[in-house]
Amino acid sequence: MKKIILSALFICSSMMAFSQVLPSFQFGLKGGVNLSKFSTQSTFSSDNRAGYYGGVWARIGAAGIHLQPELYISGKNTTLKNSAGEENKVKFTSLDIPVLVGTKIGAAGIGIRLNTGPVVSFILNKDQSIGDATSSALKGNFKDQNFAWQFGAGLDISKLGIDLRYEQGLSKIGKDDYSGKKLGLFTLGLAYRLF
C-alpha cells in the first residue's frame, strides 16, 4: 500500500512538472480601477483621482515563465495646479499596451503570479477643465504617446484572477509648464480566463 501511495505521488508530481514545461496559451478579459499620481505628489493626495481600465489579455508560457501581452482602454484622471493655486482637471483616455514577463507559482487551479514589463500608451482623448482659471498657461500641451514600466502581482483561482500593479511613467507627459511631470498609476483589476 505504501508503494502504491508513493508511486501515485511520484506520478502526480511528474505530471505537474511536465505540465510546467509544455507551452500553454490563455486568453481572457479584464477590467478594474486605477489611481493616478504624479511623481511630485504623495500617493493618496487629494489631487489624485480614480479612473478605470478594461480590455483583453493573453498569456503564452512554458517552463514556469510566461509572456503576457495586454490591450485595454484606460481612463486616467488627475488634477494639475499652478503656483497661484488654479486647477486644471485632466481626463486622459488612452489605448494601453503592456507586454509583461512573469512567472506563476502554484497548482490545482490556484497560483500566485509575479510580472513586470514595459507599457506604451496612445492618448485617444485629453479633456481639460480649467474652470474659472485666468491663466491660459494652465492648459497643458500633452503628448500623444507615453512610455511606462509596470510591475505587480496577481492571484489566480480557477478562471478568475486578481491583479495589483504599479505603473511608473518613463516619459514626460507634456511640454511647457508640465514638462517635468511623469504619470504613475496604481491599478487593481479583475480578470476572467475565457480559455
Image (cartoon, rainbow, N blue to C red):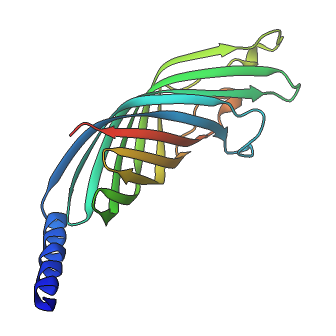
Quarter of the view holding residue 104 = bottom left
Q: Residue furthest bottom?
A: 2
Quarter of the view holding residue 3 = bottom left
Q: List x then y, in percent, for residue 27.
A: 24, 39
Could you tell me how many numbered marks the image carries?
A: 0
184 above or below 135?
below
Q: List x then y, in percent, for residue 81.
A: 79, 28
Q: Is residue 130 left or right of residue 86?
A: left
Q: Nearer the viewer, residue 9 or 29?
A: 9
Q: Which quarter of the image is occupied by the C terminus?
A: top left
Residue occupying image coordinates x 51% and y 48%: 164
88 above or below 20?
above
Q: Which quarter of the image is occupied by the N terminus?
A: bottom left
Residue occupying image coordinates x 36% and y 59%: 111
Residue occupying image coordinates x 14% and y 57%: 23
46 above or below 20?
above
23 above or below 184?
below
Q: List x then y, in percent, for residue 98.
A: 38, 42
Q: Is residue 153 left or right of residue 46?
A: left
Work out whether residue 174 can be spotted.
Answer: no
Residue occupying image coordinates x 78% and y 34%: 46
